[in-house]
Image: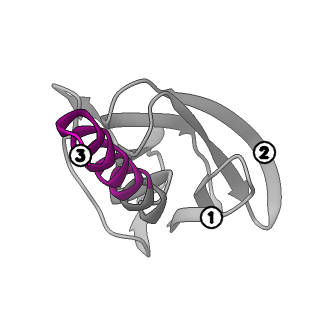
């Protein structure tokens, strides 16, 4: 085999390995999801875990996510529910390999849930909370 042939064979092997490795990565991975009542410097200022109960009079609740994207850009959506009824779907564009993104809702008494959902309908993250 000539030197050029060896080089081409090496490139093909490396390219195949890179494609195979890329296919192993999930398209979007949510590594963090926090509920909070404010965002400061693109971070959840007062992060709460799923199951938290907010006091009556809480004005807004945010759902903050940290997302890794294998092949940017990508999209996800936040789906907000109250007492089992879907209130809204908000599309979020993830432009980079690492993203901080969030949405919020004005909240009032009830049992709430927010999901991060892939374009294929896969729930990537979920948080539930109550407002007294």
Q: Is residue 27 left or right of residue 54?
A: right
At 67% across and 63% down in the image, what residue appears? 122
Residue placed most toward the observer, 78 or 44 = 78
Q: Which residue is mark 3?
A: 6
Q: Residues within 10 Å of mark 1 (few under 14, many from 20)?
A: some
Q: Secondary structure at mark 2?
A: strand
Proximity of marks 2 and 1: CB atoms separated by less than 8 Å: no
Proximity of marks 3 and 1: CB atoms separated by less than 8 Å: no
Residue placed most toward the observer, 104 or 109 = 104
Is residue 59 something that shows in the picture?
no
Q: Is residue 84 above or below residue 69?
A: below
Q: Is residue 12 left or right of residue 41?
A: right
Q: CA distance from mark 3 to mark 1?
A: 45 Å
Q: Secondary structure at mark 1?
A: strand
Q: Magenta segment range?
A: 1-19
Q: Is residue 42 left or right of residue 63?
A: left
Residue placed most toward the observer, 26 or 124 = 26
At 56% across and 30% down in the image, what residue appears? 92
Is residue 80 something that shows in the picture?
yes
Q: Which mark is residue 123?
A: 1
Q: Which residue is mark 2?
A: 87
Q: Residues within 10 Å of mark 3 (few under 14, many from 20)?
A: few
Q: Earlier in the sequence, mark 3 or mark 1?
A: 3
Q: Earlier in the sequence, mark 2 or mark 3?
A: 3
Residue 108, image x and y in percent? 61, 48
At 36% across and 60% down in the image, what residue appears? 21
At 70% across and 46% down in the image, what residue appears? 119
* Residue 2, quarter of the rendered image: top left
- Report the mark closest to the observer, 3 or 1: 3
């Amino acid at each position: 085999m000539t030197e050029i042939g060896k080089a081409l064979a090496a490139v093909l092997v490396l390219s195949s390995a890179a494609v195979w490795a890329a296919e192993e990565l999930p398209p979007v991975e949510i590594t963090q999801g926090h509920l909070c009542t404010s965002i400061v410097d693109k971070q959840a200022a007062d992060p709460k875990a799923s199951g938290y109960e907010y006091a009556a009079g809480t004005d807004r609740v945010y759902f903050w996510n940290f997302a890794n994207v294998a092949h940017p850009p990508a999209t996800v959506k936040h789906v907000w529910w109250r007492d089992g009824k879907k209130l809204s779907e908000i599309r979020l564009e993830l432009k980079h390999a690492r993203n901080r993104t969030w949405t919020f809702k004005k909240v009032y008494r009830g049992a709430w849930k927010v999901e991060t959902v892939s374009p294929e309908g896969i729930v990537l993250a979920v948080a539930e909370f109550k407002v007294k």
